[in-house]
Image: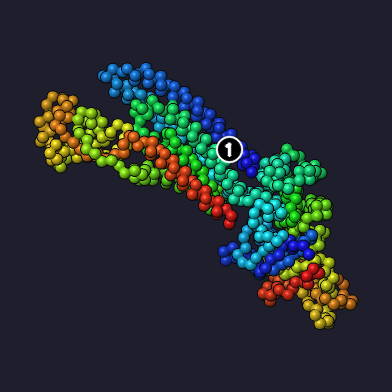
Amino acid sequence: MTTPIIETERLGKRYGRTTALTDCTLRIPAGRVVGLVGPNGAGKSTLLGLTCGLIAPSAGSIAVLGNRPGAGAAQLARVGFVAQDAPVYSGLSVADHLRLGARLNPRWDMRLAQGRVERLGLDPAQKAGRLSGGQRAQLALTVAAAKRAELLVLDEPVASLDPLARTAFLRDLREFVAELGVSVVLSSHLLGDLERVCDHLVVLAASRVQLAGDVSDLLATHYRFAAPRDLPPGADVIHADDSGREPVAIVRSAAPLPGAEHADLEDLGLAYMTRALISPEARRSPEGRHLPEAER
Amino acid sequence: MIWLTWRQFRTQAVVAVAGLAVLAIYLVVLGLRMRATYDADIVDCLPADCTGARRDFDEAYGTQVALVGALLLGVPALIGAFWGAPLITRELEEKTDRMVWNQSVTRTRWLAVKLTFLALAGVAVSGLFSLLLTWSASRYDQLIGERFQALTFASRNVAPVGYAVFAFVLGVVVGLLVRRTLPAMAVTLAAFVVVQVLMPTVLRSHLMTPVTGTVRLDAEAISRADFMGFGPDGARIDGYTMPGAWSLTTTARVFNADGTPYTQQQSRACDRGGPEAGMACIAEQDLHFSYTYQPAARYWTFQWTELSIFLGLGALLAGYGLRRIRRT
């Protein structure tokens, strides 16, 4: 088994008296496209900042690709990061950004970078400040990708894009992840965005991890049904919503539930987030909600 | 990293070079004009005209020399506020720190390269300006200037280089702590002004132990003083300055050879003829006064000490910044 891309142990981050992330224990295997989902303010950016070493933890530990994040130039070279809103130097041109990448990264892949710029139709002489939101996100992603890191961390890469640019961005992301064979962690507050690209899901709400696991496992063990019914032992109601015309419940069960349909990823994520926000019990004990992973 | 530093600094560099070029032209013209006037009116002046020629020279050029000197004093402040303070805050405000600090270069190295490169640029700008002004104003300084005077001392020779480096690093570190550009610029300016006021008024004279000596009140000494007057406890001399020295005594009591105060009654004996005859008479009385000063020969020691102090402060601040940026 290769080193997990992210391994955390009771990781926490506080800003003064505000808790941004608490008690986060995760083990994400290599080679995944990881979706990190949660409502705004759930601690997604904090977790990603901790992952690339931009911020330091105030409790617990985190190892990324087996090392302390941001521990040195070598570790920085292994992790690519695109921050929220894809910051770029507005005064520098597209070509300048590629030169910046080439000067600052030992494994820079100029062919890849130029190829992407060409394919995306970006004008190399254009100042980055004049690019549209979608183009800026693409440029930032290009700089992160051509670095040839082993792990790409993308914080809300599509949040500021219109639906069209969003679809294009995600399609492009899927293509080059397959091409480069990198692991990716990307966050969003919309599950719909992640559903299309992710094979591993982490649900973060109320500063805690609510759920983590491979998408196929999650889908296999979660059910949705419209009417109340008796549950077999070991099944667990995640959230029952009776506000609609028909009551709907999302249930986790390792054993098959005959007659119930499988929940889709959106239902499932929403159920865990809703539970975290309404139930103080769930906030206190998120442990044990993790699904057993095939690799363990 | 050097490429990026230069790329981000390019515009500021062009502004600095343009400003320096304008100043250079002005200072060369001023210097040449002062030399011409000096050669025509001061060299070989008849003793009767020399005082007047000196006064005319001061009137013609004094203001300009003082203004350019003040400008040179302002250059480190500008470097600190416009090069130093925004160096980190601009990255933080535009969130580009998240981009650049995630390339394969540690923050420490990023800052070290930027500090070195821009500090050297600061050295070049302030050094060239100081060199030009020192050359340009040399006739004026020779004839009229007091080189230990706060403004003159701080705007000639090597001292300005130290100020520039210090102000730049100060700006960067303040930016690192304050994290917003405008407040960082304001704090940098305020801190630098405080240092520039404290240094000449309080600190500089203590850098070396001053010399206290007895000066004979002869005609030469009288000509180097502003004023001599009498109080209830005897005569006082005001504003005496030894040639080229830094006076730390502004007013001193005048004593007879036997150590008793020289009194107004005694001076009446000299009240005959005009004021000049009276002064000549006083000069013959073998009077003396006590005088504390930094000797002229120490000028360069003071310049190099000043440079070392500010470079040292800059290095300390830089060391702190390099440590601090790891936890930002």
Residue B104, placed above or below residue A62: above
User: Hey, what amino acid is under mark 1?
Assistant: Gln
- Residue B91 appears in the picture as rendered: yes
Element at badge 1? helix
Q: Where residue B215 sits: x, y (%)?
A: 22, 35
Who's the residue at 25% across and 32% down the image? B225
Image quarter in which the N terminus of chain A is found: bottom right
- Side of A100 where B150 appears, left or right: left
User: Is A215 situated above or below B51?
Assistant: below
- For mark 1, does the 10 Å Cα neighbourhood hold few (<14), some (14 to 19), or many (20 or more) residues? few
* Residue at which label 1 appears: B12
Screen quadrant of the C terminus of chain A: bottom right
Q: Is residue B49 above or below residue A200?
A: above
Q: Residue furthest right?
A: A259
Which residue is at a point 51% across and 43% down the rendered structure image? B168
Q: In which image quadrant can residue A285 be found?
A: bottom right
In the rendered image, residue A219, in percent from the top left (x then y), is placed at: 83, 69
Is A267 left, or right, of B114 in this rendering? right
Q: Residue at x 16, y 38 (%)?
A: B255
Q: Nearer the viewer, residue A102 or B93?
A: A102
* Residue A81: % across, % down: 70, 53
Determine whether B184 is above or below A249 in the image.
above
Q: Position of residue A70 (x, y in %)?
A: 65, 56
Using the image as rendered, state which of residue B21 and residue B204 is in the foreground.
Answer: B204
Foreground of the two, A97 or B65:
A97
Residue shown at 34% from the left, 23% from the top: B56
**Chain on which label 1 sits:** B
